[in-house]
Amino acid sequence: MTSRNELYECEHCGNIVEVVRAEGPGPSVRCCDQAMTLYAECEHEVVEKSTESVESEMADGILVLAGDGDDPLDEEAIMVWIDMG
């Protein structure tokens, strides 16, 4: 059973989804014709890091500038998502 705000990742294509509404027992979260994996259980390093960010409303969305360029992560690291909550 899924719970609200859980994150799931497709091991095949890398899509990540968040459960927004979960009521009662439902089917597993699926992508690419297979069950998705609860994000916390995926086989990659999860780094929770607080990064200073600046948000600016634009005509076609929100522009987010994150970090100051002095990021201690290696050059191959990428930011997967930013929680604006």
Image (spheres, rainbow, N blue to C red):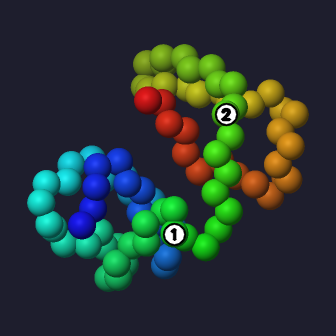
Identify the residue at the far bottom of this view.
33
Spot occupied by residue 67 in the image (x, y as percentages of width and height): 74, 31
The label on residue 41 is 1
Give the image quarter of residue 36: bottom left
Residue visible at 64% across and 45% down in the picture: 48
Give whichever of 61, 65 is nearer the camera.
Answer: 65
Q: What residue type is labelled 2?
A: Ser
Spot occupied by residue 13 in the image (x, y as percentages of width and height): 49, 73
Spot occupied by residue 19 in the image (x, y as percentages of width and height): 30, 53
- State the separation of the CA atoms marked 1 and 2: 21 Å
Residue visible at 26% across and 72% down in the picture: 28
Q: What residue type is labelled 1?
A: Glu
The label on residue 8 is none
- Up/down of 7 relative to 49, above or below: below
Quarter of the image containing the N terminus?
bottom left
10 Å crowding of disc 1: few (<14), some (14-19), many (20+)? few
Quarter of the image containing the C terminus?
top left
Give whichever of 38, 29 is nearer the camera.
Answer: 38
Dot 1 or dot 2: first in sequence order is 1
Residue visible at 49% across and 25% down in the picture: 62
* Residue position for label 2: 50
Residue visible at 68% across and 62% down in the picture: 45
- The answer to whether residue 20 shows anywhere in this view is yes
- Up/down of 44 relative to 20, above or below: below
Classify residue 25 as left or right of residue 32: left
Mark 1, secondary structure of its residue? helix
